[in-house]
Amino acid sequence: MDGLDDIVEEFLVESHENLDQLDTDLVALEQEPDSRERLSSIFRTIHTIKGTSGFLAFGRLEEVTHVGENMLSRLRDGVLALTPERTSVLLRMVDTVRSLLASIEATGGEGGVDVSAVVAEISAAMEDSPAPAPAPVAVAGAPAEVAPEIAPEIAPEAAAEVVAAAEAVVEAAAETEPEPVHDEVHDEHHDEVHDDHADGGLPAGAARPEGQGAQQRRAVADSTIRVDVDLLDSLMLLVGELVLTRNQIVQYVGRSTDTDLVRASQRLNLIASELQEGVMKTRMQPIDHIWSKLPRVVRDLGIQCGKSVRLEMEGRDTELDKTLLEAVKDPLTHLVRNSVDHGIEAPDRRRAAGKPAEGVLTLRAKHESGQVVVEVADDGAGIDPVKVGAKAVERGLVTADQLARMSPADVFQLIFLPGFSTAAAVTNVSGRGVGMDVVKTNIEAIGGTIEVESEPGRGTVCRLRIPLTLAIVPALTVECAGDRYAIPQISLQELVSLDAEKAANAVEEVGGAPVYRLRGELLPLVRLTDVLGLASDRHDGHVVIAVLRSEGRRFGLVVDRVINTEEIVVKAVGGQLKAIGLYSGATVLGDGAVALILDVQALARRALRTESSERQEARGAAAAGTGGGETERQRMLLAAIGEGRRVAIPLDTVTRLEQVRAEAVERVGNREVVQYRGAILPIVRLDRHLGAYGTSEREVLEVIVYSDHGRSVAIVVEEILDIVDGGAAVRSDIDDMGLLGSAVLGDKVTELLDVRAAILAADPAFYATDDHSPASALLEV
């Protein structure tokens, strides 16, 4: 199906299924000619094929189904009686349609299939003047045994030749290896999932379509099966349990020295990850499934409100989990209705403002940083923050003092408060003060966020950020007061670790609330112990900050320790825990312990409520007077590189830790590269770079990804060991090529990697555009 678009492919799949049913229905109808229900079903099926073929400009297919529809209409109305001859004619029509579909699938067009004979035969059957039976049609998928029935006038010798030829085609098909077809997912009433392991090729007795050649492949009708959505949900739950078990095994094996066991666990890890990814793909559907209903909504609302609105859509093929797709349907529809009713002005007002009379409403969808970003943008009157603030004060939703301390972005968030509305009058479209709060509640219930940007007179953008899936998500596990919690990585931007001396000076009190100056910007802090009402079990003054982002704003969550990153299976929590408002779910960790998943949006609201006007002033002063201060001491990532050697890498230089199959490594000239997230990453193997030869080849490579200025490098190590605080380590200037020195970390002498040199070894042009890259500061130890 390489040359066919999705519409034609779905038409072929559905039509093949309908034709198989038609064969059965027509034979059954011959036994019960008075069955009005079966006759009506046959008529509707042919009518559907005819209508779609006309839309897709398949003229011959439309012609033969049109004349067949005429006969069925007369049979249904009682004008004609069903006879065995008329049943045979209708079956020959089905065979002809099947042959046309096979040609469309193979060549993209109707090829040389002649329909004039069968059209004439159907027309004659309607006039009770039988025409001479045509030669048998070469039908893809028709069994050889039907040849005598189709052409009874053929001599026995000729019939034997036809059967022999058909058998030869079957034998050739059996000897030919079917070409694998890439999995895709279709959906109408149920999901359709490609079966890559089923026997492929042309069906028995099928003539080889024109242009197919000797190399056969699975027909489109045989490459999909219908699967009930409940079955997919059940499969997803099982995969979730498999991921939990995988995490437990990997954690256990990590403490083992059995090489074979380690290798087997690595393979299990990869297979489980690939299985998880494959099952999740079966649940992914394009957002156009819900967008397709919005043009009608916009048209009807435009007429109702007396406005001319043009709807534009970008990114209709952006895929989202089916469950989330259903969850965002109503919020998205409400935002669209709100834009047409409130946002876009009437034509006379638009002309007076120098705008075209026709308003433009734009829907955009794209994948970004592991999320789906959906925007509803209009070029209307925009939102006046002054008017919104005044209405909020009038309704008692905020005080005048609170409003004075709010930024425009905070003011726009007021429109999501329950009971808020600026509509001058209540209409049957909006203005009752309900809806926008429900929109935000529903989006946050699936782990998403909603942001509003607006400029009076220019328009408004409502931006939804939604996770790709809710079932299995990557998360950071942290510890607080002896208990473990999970933070979805979708909200995590970076980790900051401060020793006692640094924390005493860097963490400040502004307006009665703690803040941390991160690269010149004041970051509001929320201590998880304060939120939970617990006492920290860490008394050494060390501070660990998880920098999180929610609703367009950043804040720091102070925890006791960072434990690990792993993929977690999200489990729902009971009503009592949900009512607390701090937890979005729960999960089972690799060691079998249960961890609660923190609700980042709820924590963000706590952080942003504490941000006072004094803090805003302090932020401005910091931005105006930022200077070069002392470089933060970094936590260190320890890695083994072979021959018992260990290297330490500043944690701030690590963008992501990955595992890559060894066979995925490719070459460009003399350099090794790997494909990663749509880019080609150069590879540097630290064992070779630092002369630690003698390590055995591994099936799975441990990779440290470093990214900066739009470029990335993959650093390959033998094993990731630990994350430690290198601030108080005993240092030495004893070094070698590619090193900055050495230190005692974890009671062992550890080499301090010159990360810049390693990056340049993989990509000499990495810093070519910026010799004073911030990375140079991050590399200082």
Image: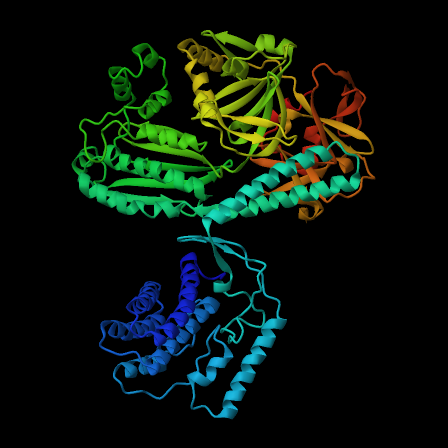
Whether residue 764 can be seen here: no
Q: Position of residue 337 (x, y in %)?
A: 27, 37
The residue at 33%/64% (across/down) is 48
Q: How is the image coloured?
A: rainbow
**The quarter of the displayed image where residue 561 is located:** top right
The image shows a total of numbered marks equal to 0
Is 167 situated above or below 203? below
Q: Provide residue 347's location: percent of width, then percent of height.
A: 18, 38
Q: Quadrant of residue 349?
A: top left
Relative depth, front residue between 761 and 57: 57
Q: Residue 326, how many percent across, how many down?
A: 39, 41
Quadrant occupied by the C terminus: top right
Asked whether, in this view, residue 347 is left or right of residue 481, the answer is left
Query: Would residue 577 be found to the left or right of residue 682 on screen?
Result: left
Q: Quadrant of residue 4?
A: bottom left
Residue at image x 47%, y 92%? 155
Q: Do we see residue 482 in this rendering?
A: yes
Left or right: 762 as drawn, with respect to 209: right
Instruction: Report the side of 690 relative to 198 (left or right).
Output: right
- Residue located 41% across and 42% down the image: 325
Image location of residue 740, percent across then percent down: 74, 24
Q: Between residue 312 and residue 245, name the one nearer to us.
A: 245
Q: Foreground residue, 198 or 629?
A: 198
Q: Is residue 478 above or below residue 151?
A: above
